Image: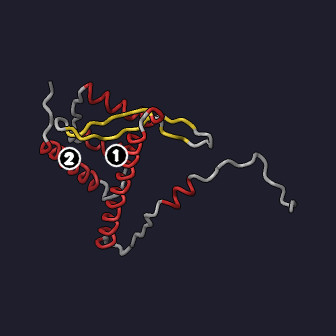
C-alpha cells in the first residue's frame, strides 16, 4: 500500500512546483503562457516526474469530474447540474464527500451543497480582492484594477431569455 503523504510532504511538492513555474516564467521573461508549455519545459529539463496515483484516487477524481459535469435542460432551456456534493467532517479521514442525485437528495442536503458552493464563491471573491489590492499597491506600471463583486446583476442577466425569433421583425411596423 502506498504511503500517505503528510501535509509537510505535500507542501514540499507544492513548493517544488512553484519553483518550477517561476523558472519557466523567467525563461519566458515573465510573459504568461499555457501550462501545456510549462509541462513541456519541465519535462525537457528533467524537472518533473509524475507521481503514481492509486487506482482508488484516480477513480474518485474521474468519477467526480464526470458526475459534476452531467446536466439536464430545464423547461426554460437552461442547463442544470444533476449531481451535487456536500462535505461532512470525519474524525478519521478529515472530510467525506457525499454525492447525490439532485432530485433524490433531501432539502437539507441540497441546501448544504449549495451553501458550500456559495461559500466557496465568497472565499474566491475575498482572494480576488486581496490579489487586486496587492497588484494596485505594488505594480510598477501604475495601472489600477477595479472590480465590482455584486453578482446579482450577473445572475439576473444570465437568467434572461436568450431565445430569439427565427425572423427579424419588420422595421416598418408600428
In the rendered image, the vertical position of residue 31 relative to residue 105, given as above or below = below
Q: x%, y% of residue 105?
A: 42, 35
Closer to viewer: mark 1 or mark 2:
2
Q: Residue furthest bottom?
A: 142
Q: Considering the numbered disc 2 on the image, is that residue within a helix, a strand or a loop?
A: helix
Query: How busy is the neighbourhood of tag 1: few (under 14 within 10 Å), some, or many (20 plus)?
Result: few
At x 26% / y 25%, what residue is drawn? 55
Q: Which mark is residue 7?
A: none
Which residue is denoted by mark 2 in the rendering?
14
Q: x%, y% of residue 33?
A: 37, 51
At x 33% / y 35%, what residue is drawn? 98
Task: Measure how far apart labels 1 and 2 are at the Cα level.
Answer: 15 Å
Which quarter of the image is occupied by the N terminus? Answer: top left
Which quarter of the image is occupied by the C terminus? Answer: bottom right
At x 34% / y 46%, what residue is drawn? 35
- From the viewer's side, name the closer residue of 21 and 28: 21
- From the viewer's side, name the closer residue of 34 and 113: 113
Q: Considering the numbered disc 1 on the image, is that residue within a helix, a strand or a loop?
A: helix
Which residue is denoted by mark 1 in the rendering?
35
- From the viewer's side, name the closer residue of 133 and 108: 108
- Quarter residue 149 falls in: bottom left
Q: x%, y% of residue 94?
A: 20, 40
Which of pointers 1 and 2 lies earlier in the amino acid sequence? 2
In the rendered image, the vertical position of residue 50 relative to residue 33, given as above or below = above
- Quarter residue 38 falls in: top left
Q: x%, y% of residue 12?
A: 14, 46
Left or right: where 168 falls relative to 58: right
At x 36% / y 75%, what residue is drawn? 142
Amino acid at each position: 500500500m502506498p504511503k500517505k503523504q503528510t501535509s509537510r510532504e505535500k507542501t514540499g511538492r507544492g513548493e517544488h512546483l512553484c519553483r518550477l513555474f517561476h523558472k519557466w516564467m523567467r525563461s519566458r521573461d515573465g510573459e504568461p503562457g499555457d501550462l501545456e508549455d510549462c509541462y513541456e519545459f519541465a519535462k525537457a529539463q528533467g524537472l518533473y516526474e509524475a507521481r503514481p496515483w492509486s487506482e482508488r484516487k484516480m477513480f474518485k477524481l474521474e468519477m467526480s469530474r464526470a458526475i459534476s459535469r452531467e446536466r439536464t435542460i430545464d423547461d426554460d432551456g437552461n442547463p442544470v447540474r444533476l449531481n451535487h456534493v456536500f462535505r461532512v467532517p470525519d474524525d478519521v479521514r478529515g472530510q467525506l464527500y457525499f454525492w447525490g442525485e439532485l432530485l433524490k437528495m433531501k432539502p437539507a442536503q441540497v441546501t448544504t451543497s449549495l451553501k458550500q458552493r456559495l461559500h466557496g464563491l465568497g472565499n474566491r471573491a475575498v482572494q480576488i480582492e486581496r490579489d487586486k489590492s496587492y497588484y494596485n499597491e505594488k505594480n510598477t506600471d501604475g495601472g489600477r484594477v477595479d472590480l465590482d463583486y455584486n453578482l446579482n446583476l450577473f445572475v439576473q442577466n444570465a437568467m434572461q431569455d436568450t431565445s430569439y425569433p427565427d425572423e427579424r421583425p419588420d422595421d416598418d411596423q408600428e
